[in-house]
Image: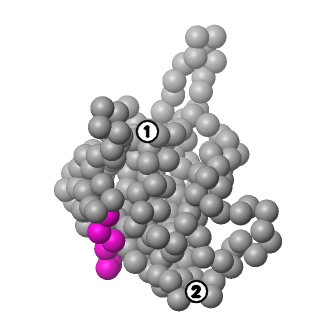
């Protein structure tokens, strides 16, 4: 289904449009533990994800001495933009972000999940349109990479497809071979 709209038919024969959501993830409070927790939440809610490795980056647009762990994610969902945003805000709130604090965008945070783009097509080029330095660092795979293996996520320095192993209740890295990632992720996310 290269570049095509993925469709599912409900029992009443109306069509559900499935969208791809291009996200940036970030944390500078216990960033390694928080990174894995964000992924657990995302995989638990949305299933299989295409994940760029977490990279350490300098804080951007906030005053903080703490480095951020940032990553890029693509997920597929039949939910609309507002429903997905609601899910992401729920994750941030569960992880301690005070959404009512008017200074929240200027403070350190355990979870910051932003939607960069939403589209009916799978194309990693959507990330190239983002101007933030941390997005470009993650996209370019420039590192330094965050070792999440002590928190239960296999170390990888290339984009990977991840899912939840329900039996073990752990996130599993499925593919981290550079040559196969796009084909595998597209296949996993479009099936």
Residue drawn at x 51%, y 74% as measured from the top left: 28
Q: Is 139 covered by the magenta stretch? A: no
Q: How many marks?
A: 2
Residue 114, given in percent of the width and then of the height, sits at: 59, 61
Q: Name the chief secondary structure element in magenta.
A: loop
Residue 14, given in percent of the width and then of the height, sits at: 63, 18
Q: How is the image coloured?
A: one colour
Above or below for 145 versus 159: below
Q: Which residues are magenta?
A: 141-148
State the residue in front, 116 or 162: 162
Q: Residue furthest top?
A: 12
Callout 2 secondary element: loop
Q: Which residue is mark 1?
A: 47
Residue drawn at x 58%, y 86% as measured from the top left: 64
Residue 182, given in percent of the width and then of the height, sits at: 30, 52
Label placed on residue 64: 2
Q: Quadrant of the C terminus?
A: top left
Residue 92, given in percent of the width and then of the height, sits at: 61, 57
State the residue in front, 2 or 127: 127
Q: Is residue 72 left or right of residue 185?
A: right
Above or below for 141 versus 88: below
- Marks 1 and 2, how far apart at CA: 33 Å
Badge 1 or badge 2: first in the primary sequence: 1
Residue drawn at x 52%, y 58% as measured from the top left: 23
Callout 1 secondary element: loop
């Amino acid at each position: 289904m290269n570049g095509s709209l993925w469709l599912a038919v409900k029992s009443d024969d109306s069509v559900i449009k499935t969208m791809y959501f291009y996200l940036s993830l970030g944390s500078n409070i216990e960033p390694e533990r928080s990174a894995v927790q964000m992924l657990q939440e995302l995989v638990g809610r949305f299933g299989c994800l295409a994940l760029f490795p977490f990279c350490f980056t300098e804080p951007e647009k906030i005053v903080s001495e703490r480095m951020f762990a940032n990553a890029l994610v693509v997920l597929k969902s039949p939910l609309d933009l507002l429903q997905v945003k609601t899910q992401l805000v729920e994750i941030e709130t569960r992880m301690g972000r005070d959404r009512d604090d008017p200074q929240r965008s200027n403070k350190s945070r355990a979870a910051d999940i932003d939607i960069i783009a939403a589209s009916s097509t799978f194309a990693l080029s959507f990330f190239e349109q983002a101007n933030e330095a941390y997005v470009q660092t993650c996209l370019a795979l420039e590192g330094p990479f965050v070792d999440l293996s002590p928190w239960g996520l296999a170390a990888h320095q290339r984009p990977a497809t991840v899912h939840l192993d329900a039996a073990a209740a752990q996130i599993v890295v499925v593919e981290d071979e550079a040559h196969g990632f796009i084909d595998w992720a597209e296949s996993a996310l479009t099936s």
